[in-house]
Image (cartoon, grey):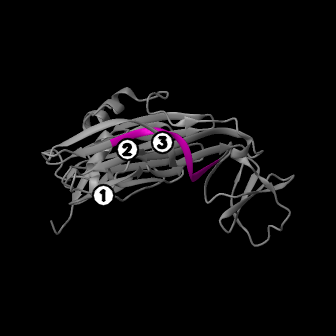
Amino acid sequence: MKSLHLISIFLAALLVGTLVGYYGHQPKSNVTSPELCVLKEYSGDLDGLTLIGEFDGVKVYDRKGTYIIDDGKSKHLLNASEVFFFNWGFVALRNESEVRAVPFVKFSVDQYGRTNVSTGNLTAEVPVVVLRACGYDGKPLWNLTFSGYTWAYDGGKYGVKENGTAVPGILATNTSDYLYALVYQASPRQFSDLRRYAPDDYFYVFGKNGTVREFDLGGGYVPIRNTFLLSNGSYVLMGLEQPQLDGSPQSGYVMILNGTKVIWSRLFQMNDPSCLCYVIPGWGGIDKNGCALFGLYDGEGRYCNGKFTYVANLTG
């Protein structure tokens, strides 16, 4: 398992541009199962239903947590709680379980109080997060499954013994053409440093044919926090904070995209003499022109037309 510093990973990602395919971290992909995109015929009335939008002639209505798809010839029911709609189809996000091989991390404390770490793979039924893309005709386009890792802690003869599965967190948003997803690994609160031995975090851009871009965000000693991901329909703003092992902030990162193009990004390091702004506390906004505003511990960060400005709190 590689252990690279978050800062170097960010810089490498920005320099390379990351129009890449899948490697060792590869999420499971499958487009062959017709069950991925089951749309049931709907004969009910559309009166009183909220029109979400029209996508290349297809109208989508909200029906109390489900959706009605009307292509003008027939109506179908889509039973999913979180769905993103595009002209080319839709993507549903689901929490499921699956038997698969996942990384395994074990901490063992010996009789002298020393902690030994072992890693490997374990096949088990684990919770997963699934992204399923389908056309409005019900045909599958692509399917990706994201899993975390299993872990165990053995505190020795008189210590605690615990085990479990860490499920990745996912933030998702969309524009008219693309789905954006921040996929980041978690860890149990009492053993947060298990994170350093888990798979890396990734930021993805998906289109009709699957992955368009991916950014390897690396993996710190503990999980990232104060994440946000939002869109105004054209531009996308993503941000996160990487803490240190003791919980104090280490660095923060912000990226702005227009479609698949990164138009601005910045790594905020602690005690950076060029900007005494520290790292982001987990909120942001972006307008129709791609101008962004996001929180910093001692003020606000503002980006517009290629210029970044830090505005300190008046209270200091």
Q: Position of residue 64 (x, y in %)?
A: 67, 69
Residue at the farthest front position: 157
Q: Judge left or right: residue 2 versus residue 208.
A: left
Using the numbered discs, state the Cα–Cα distance from disc 1 to disc 2 in whole angstroms: 28 Å
Element type at marker 1?
A: helix
Q: Which residues are magenta?
A: 91-105
Specify whether 235 is left or right of 106: right
Q: Which mark is residue 123?
A: none
Answer with the quarter of the image where residue 11 lies: top left
Query: Dividing the image into 4 quarters, which one contains the N terminus?
Result: top left
Residue found at x 49% / y 29%: 22
Which residue carries the number 1 mark?
189
User: Label 2 belongs to which residue?
Assistant: 255
Mark closer to the observer (2, 3): 2
Crowdedness near tag 3: few (<14), some (14–19) or many (≥20) residues, C-alpha within 10 Å: some
Q: Which residue is label 3 attached to? A: 258
Q: Quick check: is 104 in the magenta stretch?
A: yes
Task: Say whether residue 166 is magenta.
Answer: no
What amino acid is at disc 2? Met
Q: Residue at x 44, y 33 (%)?
A: 25
Q: Nearer the viewer, mark 3 or mark 1?
A: 1
Q: Earlier in the sequence, mark 1 or mark 2?
A: 1
Judge the density around disc 2: few (<14), some (14-19), many (≥20) Cα neighbours within 10 Å: some
Q: Is residue 252 visible?
A: no
Q: Quadrant of the C terminus?
A: bottom left
